[in-house]
Amino acid sequence: MISFEHVTKRYEVAERPAVDDLTIDVPDAMVTILIGPSGSGKSTTMRMVNRLIEPTSGVVRLGGADVRDLDVEDLRRGIGYAIQGVGLFPHWTVHENVGVVPWLLKWPQPKIDARVRDLLDLVGLEPDVYDGKYPDELSGGEAQRVGVARALAADPPVLLMDEPFGAVDPLTRDRLQAEFTKIQQALRKTVVFVTHDIDEALKLGDRIAIMREGRLVQFDKPECVIAYPADDFVSDFVGSERALKRLSLARVAGVASETATNDWAASVPRSATLREALARILETGEREIGVSDESGNIIGSVGLEDVFAHFERPVE
Amino acid sequence: MTRTWPWRPFLAPTIAAIVYGASLFVPGLWEAVLGALFPDEVRVLYHAPMPLLVWQTLLIVAASSALSIGIGMGLGVFVTRPFGADFFDVVTDLSNLGQTFPPIAVFTLAVPLLGFGFRPTVFALTIYGVLPVLHNTIAGIGSVPPAIVESARGMGFTPGQTLRKVELPLASAVIIAGIRVSVVINVSTSTIGAIAGAGGLGAPIISGLANSDPAVTLQGALLTTALALILDGYLGAVQHVAEGRSAQLDAA
Ligand SMILES: Nc1ncnc2c1ncn2[C@@H]1O[C@H](COP(=O)(O)OP(=O)(O)OP(=O)(O)O)[C@@H](O)[C@H]1O
Ligand SMILES: [Mg+2]
């Protein structure tokens, strides 16, 4: 749906381009993460999609069409856009903020009102409580939720999110990420998501694009980024504990084996990650523990051997 | 939406305005007070009725303030648009220059062009009133966080919608502060208009000067100051309300 073809953005004052000959096809209905150090061109890349920035050369396409051929306001109204915290309009209520793109699209007011309530529900904010509040009356996490609701308001097929969970504490961030994953599973938008945080990238991304000094260094599934970092820069960026990070990307359900006995000293749910299973194994001192389904029935087991086997299997 | 219109800040200036307005129709009161202050003076009140003088001043101030606000905000918006950015320095330099030009000289030079009376007065006051409005319009728009403007553009606001719905409302408190300064300057400077025959509250001041009637000068000065304070009070209240709304900026 979104593709970059040899896109370069050069600012007059800068010695190197902010984005340098970028070619990438962003897959539909998936979350593509743009990650890299500060100044690596992530925001610049994202803003070229909705033409907040025009490339110096190259073409950005949306659904096959060169974005420069589309009416700029129509283009933007058709793309959900969420940026870190501050993007809410401080002089408008939550209701007005969330309803802004439908308002720009001239939806009838009752339809906007109903839509805003649905969206507040979707992002976990009680409509009756939050509808009339102003942004200064929201916590950081609530403001981020409103930001996400606003981006979803006109049901755009594409979402651009620039560090949408940037300015909140780790706990709130975890909750927002979990909710985002749930919403994304239901809605299947094409999402371009900028972050600094490799853990966030691994958790949310279906694909990860790693950028450095305006260039694309690696574009891969999260598992592959961890298992086969393209170079030292990527492996540094992924950081220490690569092995553990790889474990956190795999679910117990994928490796558990059926067993005759149901008698285990401990168990983990099958939705747990391998990393959580390993932790549980180490805590209990057993070589193997049980795996339970959603209602708590033991359905199999997972052990140290499975963990090792997981590492030996090639990642594709 | 959930916040009601705050009327309280408007209470004090309204009471002052009522007292002021009422006193204009009781010249005997003024005569008594000024007579007590200047027991040796024969003439303590200017011959024209006070309501007329105040009305003339208000007309001059209204016309010049409207022009100052229109020109100041218009230029301020223009030079903060991408297409007007090149004119930023020229416009601010010119308006600074206008402000430092002596007012009497502006009148003197304007009279041959615009004739006597109302028009050269409004012209001169407008020149003086533009700077504070222009300056604060630029500062106010500049104080809107770039992230908010960017998110407006990113969601598909047209440039006009961004200006009207986002930049101007968020800059309003600062702009109103500039309008307030401009109007108060206009009220007191408007008295010079009497030299050009524009009437208004400058007339008793000049007449008192010419005829050595200090009580008459004081009458004009008091009426002018009180009028300036009342208008200042109203605009201060408006500013207060606008500040309350844009204070939400800090939190967002
Ligand atoms: N308006 C501008 N004028 C000049 N240079 C700019 C401008 N905007 C960005 N740059 C430069 O372009 C490069 C890429 O910026 P960009 O904002 O895309 O980085 P980023 O990866 O989003 O960084 P961060 O993680 O800090 O948000 C940086 O070197 C930055 O200094
Ligand atoms: Mg950025």
Image: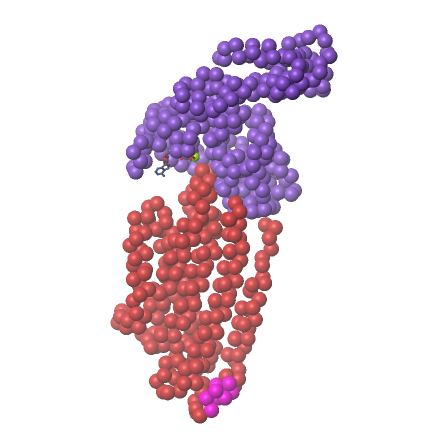
Task: Name the residue nearer the viewer: A117 or A19.
Answer: A19
Q: Is residue A102 depicted above or below B179 in this figure?
A: above
Residue A84: where, in percent of width, then height? 49, 38
Which quadrant of the structure image shows residue B122?
bottom left
Question: Residue B53 in magenta?
Answer: no
Task: Name the residue nearer the viewer: B115 or A126.
Answer: A126
Please state the extent of the stretch shown in magenta in the rendering.
Answer: B31-39
**Prevailing secondary structure of the magenta residues:** helix
Residue A101 appears in the picture as rendered: no
Q: Is residue B154 left or right of residue B92?
A: right
**What is the drawing colour of chain A?**
purple
Which quadrant of the structure image shows residue A153?
top right
Question: Residue B36 in magenta?
Answer: yes
Q: Is residue A62 left or right of residue A112?
A: left
Residue A145: where, in percent of width, then height? 57, 37
Write down which chain is painted red. Answer: B
Instruction: Name the residue at the front extreme.
Output: A285
Q: Is residue A308 left or right of residue B219?
A: right
Residue A9: where, in percent of width, then height? 34, 31
Task: Name the residue nearer the viewer: A285 or A126.
Answer: A285
Q: Residue at x 33, y 77 (%)?
A: B195
Residue A162: where, in percent of width, then height? 47, 34
